[in-house]
Amino acid sequence: MTDTQDTPLLLHREGAIATLTFHRPAALNAIDVPMALALRDAVRTLAQDRALRCVVLEGAGRAFMAGGDLDTLAADPVRGAAELLAPLNEAVALLGQLDAPVIAKVHGAAAGAGLSLMLQADFVYAAEGTRFNLAYINLGASCDVGASWALPRIVGLRNALEIAMLGETLDCAQAQRLSLINRVLPPAELDAAVQQLAQRLAAGPTVALGHMRRLMRAGLDRSLRDQLAAEACAFDACARTADLPRGIAAFHAKQTPQFEGR
């Protein structure tokens, strides 16, 4: 059995579902350079995996992620930030390009870079009692890891400015009201609920899901005409898959489609 005690990120594969576990529990999974590099490398691997159909992000121990590791920044903030952000930004960009949907399974706390990473997921399920804080402003820093791109798209500009510039902690009820999270569950039910969602998504038409998630994310940056053209290209790509004929046949037969994800 592999010793995972000093492994900052775990990649577990069960069928078509991959789970990435932030694994610095003693530090509330604060992300340091080794974890950032491990995340980048893991997502690079997943990006080449044609059998992948869903990704779950989670944290070990008492929290999803408490943010960036401040010890990395304290000695040399400029160098520390550069070493952290280069691999993190690549990981976020690659996650956004996947066909496989991404679920964040959140508990304890999602703060700073942890909240930024959570925002990149397509679905966020949170355990009751989880706290959320963008936190950067409390340290005298602006946000990173895609927060300024994702947050206004999710909650709107006014709410995004309030969350980012006041640095206040939100509870689950506030986070759900702002659409930061999809569902709040008792801690004992979180794993099962995420597993059920992951299995449902992994059984879906993965190519179509990939086009859908990218279209939705890009739509705010395009004119209507350009978005219509992008939709047409995406639909054409889906029409060339094995899944669309399966879906049509299942619809006519009044059966549940058995998608292959290609």
Image (tube, rainbow, N blue to C red):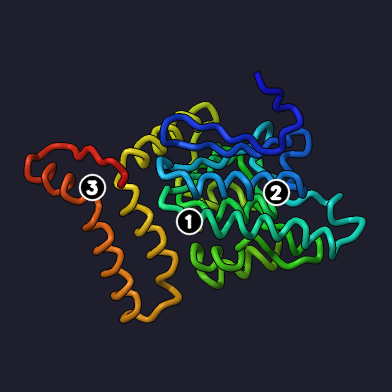
Q: Nearer the viewer, residue 139 or 172?
A: 139
Coordinates of residue 73 in the picture (x, y in percent): 85, 56
Coordinates of residue 58 in the picture (x, y in percent): 58, 39
Residue 146: give its label.
Answer: none
The furthest residue to the top = 1
Q: CA distance from mark 3 to mark 1?
A: 31 Å
**Left-right relation of 229 to 38:** left
Q: Are marks 2 and 3 in contact (CB under 8 Å)?
A: no
Q: Residue at x 51, y 64 (%)?
A: 155
**Left-right relation of 61 to 184:** right
Coordinates of residue 134 in the picture (x, y in percent): 67, 57
Q: Nearer the viewer, residue 149 or 205?
A: 205
**Left-right relation of 112 to 44:** right
Three-letter residue code for mark 2:
Leu
Q: Are marks 2 and 1 in contact (CB under 8 Å)?
A: no
Which of the two labelled residues, at mark 3 and mark 1, occupies the earlier sequence position? Answer: 1
Q: Check the image and report above or below for 142 versus 111.
A: below
Q: Residue at x 31, y 54 (%)?
A: 208
Coordinates of residue 20 in the picture (x, y in percent): 58, 39
Q: Residue 77's image quarter? A: bottom right
**Left-right relation of 157 to 113:** left
Q: Which residue is mark 3?
A: 243
Which of the two labelled residues, at mark 2 and mark 3, occupies the earlier sequence position? Answer: 2
Secondary structure beneath dot 1 equals loop
The furthest residue to the left = 252
Q: CA distance from mark 2 to mark 1?
A: 30 Å
Q: Which residue is mark 2?
A: 37
Three-letter residue code for mark 1:
Ser
Between tags 2 and 1, which lies in front? 2
Q: Which residue is mark 1?
A: 179
Q: Check the image and report above or below for 197 versus 111.
A: above
